[in-house]
Image: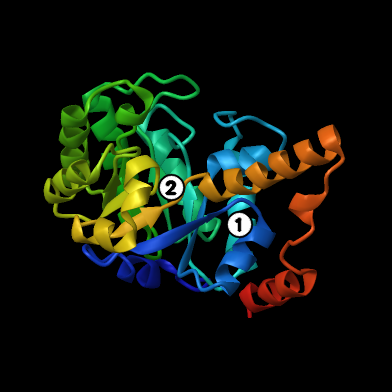
Amino acid sequence: MRHDPGPAFRALHKPGNPFILANAWDVGSARVLAGLGAEAIGTTSAGFAFTRGLPDGARISLEEALIHSADLVAATNLPVSGDLENGYADAPDGVAQTVRLACEAGLAGASIEDIRLPGAEAYDFDLAVERIKAAAAEARALPRDFVLLARADGVMTGAYDLDEAIRRIQAFEVAGADAVYIPVLPDASAVKRVCSSVSVPVNVLAVGAVAQMGRDAIGEAGAARISLGSALARATHSVLVSAATAMLETGSFGEISDTVPGSRIDELLKCGARG
Protein backbone atom coordinates (compact mmCIF):
# COMPACT_ATOMS: atom_id res chain seq x y z
CA MET A 1 0.00 0.00 0.00
CA ARG A 2 1.27 3.47 -0.86
CA HIS A 3 2.09 6.06 1.79
CA ASP A 4 -0.98 7.03 3.82
CA PRO A 5 -1.38 10.84 3.87
CA GLY A 6 -4.62 10.65 5.86
CA PRO A 7 -3.32 10.78 9.45
CA ALA A 8 -1.17 13.85 8.80
CA PHE A 9 -4.06 15.54 7.03
CA ARG A 10 -6.51 14.67 9.79
CA ALA A 11 -4.11 16.00 12.43
CA LEU A 12 -4.13 19.44 10.80
CA HIS A 13 -7.81 19.91 11.69
CA LYS A 14 -7.69 21.77 15.01
CA PRO A 15 -10.77 23.83 15.89
CA GLY A 16 -9.64 27.28 16.94
CA ASN A 17 -6.29 26.91 15.18
CA PRO A 18 -7.17 26.51 11.51
CA PHE A 19 -4.74 25.56 8.78
CA ILE A 20 -5.06 26.99 5.30
CA LEU A 21 -5.99 24.49 2.61
CA ALA A 22 -4.11 25.94 -0.35
CA ASN A 23 -6.26 25.28 -3.42
CA ALA A 24 -4.09 24.65 -6.48
CA TRP A 25 -5.20 24.29 -10.09
CA ASP A 26 -2.20 22.55 -11.66
CA VAL A 27 1.12 20.92 -10.78
CA GLY A 28 3.03 24.19 -10.97
CA SER A 29 0.73 26.07 -8.60
CA ALA A 30 0.76 23.13 -6.18
CA ARG A 31 4.56 23.10 -6.08
CA VAL A 32 4.80 26.86 -5.66
CA LEU A 33 2.33 26.73 -2.77
CA ALA A 34 4.25 23.85 -1.18
CA GLY A 35 7.49 25.78 -1.62
CA LEU A 36 5.94 28.76 0.13
CA GLY A 37 5.07 26.64 3.17
CA ALA A 38 1.53 25.34 2.61
CA GLU A 39 0.64 22.41 4.86
CA ALA A 40 -1.92 20.80 2.54
CA ILE A 41 -3.19 21.22 -0.99
CA GLY A 42 -6.79 21.24 -2.14
CA THR A 43 -8.02 20.86 -5.69
CA THR A 44 -10.50 23.39 -7.06
CA SER A 45 -13.08 22.35 -9.62
CA ALA A 46 -13.42 25.90 -10.95
CA GLY A 47 -9.67 26.51 -11.11
CA PHE A 48 -9.14 23.22 -12.93
CA ALA A 49 -11.96 24.04 -15.34
CA PHE A 50 -10.22 27.32 -16.20
CA THR A 51 -7.09 25.38 -17.23
CA ARG A 52 -9.25 23.41 -19.65
CA GLY A 53 -10.73 26.56 -21.17
CA LEU A 54 -14.05 25.93 -19.45
CA PRO A 55 -16.16 28.24 -17.25
CA ASP A 56 -16.74 27.89 -13.52
CA GLY A 57 -19.47 25.29 -13.09
CA ALA A 58 -18.51 23.32 -16.18
CA ARG A 59 -18.89 19.60 -15.68
CA ILE A 60 -15.49 17.97 -15.58
CA SER A 61 -15.82 14.19 -15.76
CA LEU A 62 -14.99 11.96 -12.81
CA GLU A 63 -12.13 10.43 -14.78
CA GLU A 64 -10.66 13.87 -15.54
CA ALA A 65 -11.00 14.94 -11.90
CA LEU A 66 -9.27 11.79 -10.64
CA ILE A 67 -6.39 12.09 -13.12
CA HIS A 68 -5.97 15.73 -12.12
CA SER A 69 -6.07 14.77 -8.43
CA ALA A 70 -3.44 12.08 -8.93
CA ASP A 71 -1.21 14.62 -10.69
CA LEU A 72 -1.40 16.95 -7.70
CA VAL A 73 -0.79 14.08 -5.28
CA ALA A 74 2.38 13.20 -7.18
CA ALA A 75 3.51 16.83 -7.42
CA THR A 76 4.43 17.46 -3.77
CA ASN A 77 4.91 15.73 -0.43
CA LEU A 78 1.78 17.39 0.97
CA PRO A 79 -1.58 15.71 1.59
CA VAL A 80 -4.17 16.61 -1.05
CA SER A 81 -7.92 16.94 -0.55
CA GLY A 82 -10.15 16.62 -3.60
CA ASP A 83 -13.01 18.91 -4.58
CA LEU A 84 -15.24 16.13 -5.90
CA GLU A 85 -18.34 18.31 -6.40
CA ASN A 86 -21.46 16.16 -5.84
CA GLY A 87 -19.48 12.93 -6.00
CA TYR A 88 -20.27 12.71 -9.72
CA ALA A 89 -23.40 10.73 -8.86
CA ASP A 90 -26.89 11.23 -7.51
CA ALA A 91 -27.33 7.83 -5.86
CA PRO A 92 -25.59 7.03 -2.56
CA ASP A 93 -23.80 3.97 -3.96
CA GLY A 94 -22.38 6.09 -6.78
CA VAL A 95 -20.99 8.60 -4.30
CA ALA A 96 -19.47 5.75 -2.28
CA GLN A 97 -17.74 4.45 -5.41
CA THR A 98 -16.29 7.92 -6.04
CA VAL A 99 -14.83 7.96 -2.53
CA ARG A 100 -13.15 4.61 -3.18
CA LEU A 101 -11.69 5.87 -6.45
CA ALA A 102 -10.52 9.05 -4.75
CA CYS A 103 -8.59 6.96 -2.24
CA GLU A 104 -7.03 4.96 -5.08
CA ALA A 105 -5.94 8.25 -6.68
CA GLY A 106 -3.96 9.00 -3.52
CA LEU A 107 -6.14 11.74 -2.04
CA ALA A 108 -5.99 12.26 1.72
CA GLY A 109 -9.64 13.29 1.75
CA ALA A 110 -12.41 14.84 -0.30
CA SER A 111 -15.48 17.04 -0.11
CA ILE A 112 -18.95 16.05 -1.31
CA GLU A 113 -21.66 18.64 -2.07
CA ASP A 114 -25.43 18.33 -1.62
CA ILE A 115 -26.36 20.02 -4.91
CA ARG A 116 -27.72 18.13 -7.91
CA LEU A 117 -25.23 19.37 -10.48
CA PRO A 118 -25.01 20.85 -13.03
CA GLY A 119 -27.97 22.85 -11.71
CA ALA A 120 -28.46 24.62 -8.38
CA GLU A 121 -31.15 22.37 -6.92
CA ALA A 122 -30.34 20.84 -3.54
CA TYR A 123 -30.88 17.15 -2.97
CA ASP A 124 -33.85 16.35 -0.75
CA PHE A 125 -32.74 16.35 2.90
CA ASP A 126 -33.09 12.61 3.38
CA LEU A 127 -31.24 11.78 0.16
CA ALA A 128 -28.50 14.27 0.99
CA VAL A 129 -27.95 12.52 4.33
CA GLU A 130 -28.03 9.06 2.78
CA ARG A 131 -25.39 10.12 0.27
CA ILE A 132 -23.03 11.19 3.06
CA LYS A 133 -23.84 8.09 5.09
CA ALA A 134 -22.84 5.89 2.13
CA ALA A 135 -19.70 7.94 1.49
CA ALA A 136 -18.69 7.76 5.16
CA ALA A 137 -19.25 4.01 5.30
CA GLU A 138 -17.03 3.59 2.24
CA ALA A 139 -14.39 5.88 3.73
CA ARG A 140 -14.27 3.77 6.91
CA ALA A 141 -13.92 0.59 4.84
CA LEU A 142 -10.89 1.87 2.91
CA PRO A 143 -7.44 0.36 3.53
CA ARG A 144 -6.13 3.71 4.80
CA ASP A 145 -7.30 6.88 6.50
CA PHE A 146 -9.49 9.24 4.47
CA VAL A 147 -10.97 12.54 5.68
CA LEU A 148 -14.52 12.99 4.36
CA LEU A 149 -15.92 16.52 4.38
CA ALA A 150 -19.64 17.05 3.76
CA ARG A 151 -20.74 20.31 2.19
CA ALA A 152 -24.08 22.07 2.54
CA ASP A 153 -23.99 24.36 -0.49
CA GLY A 154 -27.54 25.70 -0.47
CA VAL A 155 -26.65 29.02 1.15
CA MET A 156 -24.21 29.70 -1.68
CA THR A 157 -26.59 28.62 -4.45
CA GLY A 158 -29.74 30.10 -2.90
CA ALA A 159 -31.41 26.69 -2.52
CA TYR A 160 -32.01 27.11 1.23
CA ASP A 161 -31.15 29.34 4.19
CA LEU A 162 -28.56 29.09 6.96
CA ASP A 163 -30.97 27.35 9.34
CA GLU A 164 -31.43 24.54 6.82
CA ALA A 165 -27.71 24.41 6.14
CA ILE A 166 -27.00 23.91 9.83
CA ARG A 167 -29.69 21.22 10.04
CA ARG A 168 -27.92 19.46 7.20
CA ILE A 169 -24.38 19.60 8.57
CA GLN A 170 -25.65 18.34 11.92
CA ALA A 171 -27.22 15.39 10.11
CA PHE A 172 -24.03 14.90 8.07
CA GLU A 173 -22.07 14.66 11.31
CA VAL A 174 -24.40 11.95 12.59
CA ALA A 175 -24.10 10.20 9.21
CA GLY A 176 -20.34 9.91 9.71
CA ALA A 177 -18.74 12.95 8.07
CA ASP A 178 -15.32 13.78 9.50
CA ALA A 179 -15.75 17.51 8.84
CA VAL A 180 -18.40 19.85 7.47
CA TYR A 181 -18.58 22.99 5.38
CA ILE A 182 -21.13 25.68 4.50
CA PRO A 183 -19.61 27.86 1.74
CA VAL A 184 -20.09 31.64 1.59
CA LEU A 185 -21.01 32.48 5.15
CA PRO A 186 -21.99 36.15 5.44
CA ASP A 187 -20.10 37.28 8.53
CA ALA A 188 -18.22 36.40 11.72
CA SER A 189 -21.37 35.69 13.71
CA ALA A 190 -22.46 33.13 11.13
CA VAL A 191 -19.04 31.45 11.27
CA LYS A 192 -19.26 31.22 15.04
CA ARG A 193 -22.82 29.89 14.91
CA VAL A 194 -21.90 27.19 12.41
CA CYS A 195 -18.79 26.10 14.29
CA SER A 196 -20.70 25.85 17.57
CA SER A 197 -23.49 23.80 15.99
CA VAL A 198 -21.40 20.66 15.43
CA SER A 199 -18.62 18.78 17.20
CA VAL A 200 -16.62 17.84 14.08
CA PRO A 201 -14.12 20.23 12.45
CA VAL A 202 -15.58 23.00 10.30
CA ASN A 203 -14.10 24.30 7.05
CA VAL A 204 -14.66 28.00 6.31
CA LEU A 205 -14.28 29.58 2.88
CA ALA A 206 -12.19 32.76 2.80
CA VAL A 207 -14.50 34.96 0.78
CA GLY A 208 -16.19 38.34 1.19
CA ALA A 209 -16.53 39.63 4.73
CA VAL A 210 -15.13 36.39 6.14
CA ALA A 211 -11.90 36.82 4.17
CA GLN A 212 -11.53 40.25 5.73
CA MET A 213 -11.53 38.64 9.20
CA GLY A 214 -8.11 37.04 8.76
CA ARG A 215 -6.92 33.63 9.95
CA ASP A 216 -6.78 34.39 13.68
CA ALA A 217 -10.31 35.79 13.87
CA ILE A 218 -11.69 32.89 11.83
CA GLY A 219 -9.96 30.58 14.28
CA GLU A 220 -11.41 32.40 17.26
CA ALA A 221 -14.85 31.76 15.75
CA GLY A 222 -14.08 28.03 15.94
CA ALA A 223 -12.95 27.04 12.44
CA ALA A 224 -10.49 24.18 11.97
CA ARG A 225 -9.73 24.73 8.30
CA ILE A 226 -9.80 27.64 5.86
CA SER A 227 -10.13 26.93 2.16
CA LEU A 228 -9.67 29.33 -0.73
CA GLY A 229 -11.83 27.77 -3.43
CA SER A 230 -10.89 29.23 -6.79
CA ALA A 231 -9.65 32.53 -5.31
CA LEU A 232 -5.97 32.06 -6.15
CA ALA A 233 -6.78 30.84 -9.65
CA ARG A 234 -9.03 33.86 -10.17
CA ALA A 235 -6.34 36.15 -8.75
CA THR A 236 -3.91 34.98 -11.42
CA HIS A 237 -6.55 35.59 -14.07
CA SER A 238 -7.15 39.04 -12.58
CA VAL A 239 -3.53 39.91 -13.26
CA LEU A 240 -3.79 38.39 -16.73
CA VAL A 241 -6.91 40.38 -17.60
CA SER A 242 -5.61 43.65 -16.16
CA ALA A 243 -2.12 43.46 -17.68
CA ALA A 244 -3.29 42.18 -21.04
CA THR A 245 -6.05 44.80 -21.25
CA ALA A 246 -3.54 47.61 -20.69
CA MET A 247 -1.12 46.06 -23.17
CA LEU A 248 -3.63 45.40 -25.94
CA GLU A 249 -5.75 48.55 -25.57
CA THR A 250 -3.13 51.20 -24.77
CA GLY A 251 0.19 49.56 -25.54
CA SER A 252 1.31 49.86 -21.91
CA PHE A 253 3.52 47.16 -20.45
CA GLY A 254 3.76 48.70 -16.98
CA GLU A 255 1.89 45.89 -15.24
CA ILE A 256 4.38 43.26 -16.40
CA SER A 257 7.52 45.32 -15.85
CA ASP A 258 7.98 44.25 -12.23
CA THR A 259 6.95 40.61 -11.83
CA VAL A 260 8.30 37.75 -9.74
CA PRO A 261 11.68 36.77 -11.24
CA GLY A 262 11.77 33.48 -13.08
CA SER A 263 14.59 32.37 -10.80
CA ARG A 264 12.31 32.74 -7.77
CA ILE A 265 9.59 30.66 -9.40
CA ASP A 266 12.19 28.04 -10.35
CA GLU A 267 13.36 27.97 -6.73
CA LEU A 268 9.84 27.46 -5.40
CA LEU A 269 9.04 24.77 -7.96
CA LYS A 270 12.15 22.87 -6.92
CA CYS A 271 11.52 23.38 -3.20
CA GLY A 272 7.89 22.31 -3.44
CA ALA A 273 8.43 19.23 -5.59
CA ARG A 274 8.02 15.75 -4.15
CA GLY A 275 11.33 14.63 -2.66
Label 1 SS? helix
Q: Look at the picture and state if 175 lies above or below 40.
A: above
As measured in the structure, the alpha-carbon distance from the residue carrying label 1 to the one carrying label 2 is 14 Å
Camera-side residue of 93 and 79: 79
Q: Amino acid at mark 2?
A: Val
Report the residue marked by disc 2.
99
Residue at figure coordinates x 20%, y 60% from the top left:
220
Residue at figure coordinates x 56%, y 72% from the top left:
36
User: Cβ–Cβ below 8 Å for labels 1 and 2?
Assistant: no
User: Of callouts 1 and 2, which one flags the residue occurring earlier in the amino acid sequence?
Assistant: 1
Give the side of residue 257 with respect to residue 206, left or right. right
Q: How busy is the neighbourhood of tag 1: few (under 14 within 10 Å), some, or many (20 plus)?
A: some
Camera-side residue of 273 and 204: 204
* Residue 113: % across, % down: 38, 36
- Residue located farthest toward the right when viewing the structure as drawn: 251
Q: Amino acid at mark 1?
A: Ala
Q: How busy is the neighbourhood of tag 2: few (under 14 within 10 Å), some, or many (20 plus)?
A: many
Give the side of residue 48 with respect to residue 120, left or right. right
Residue at figure coordinates x 18%, y 28% from the top left:
164
Residue 205 appears in the figure: no
Report the residue marked by disc 1.
70
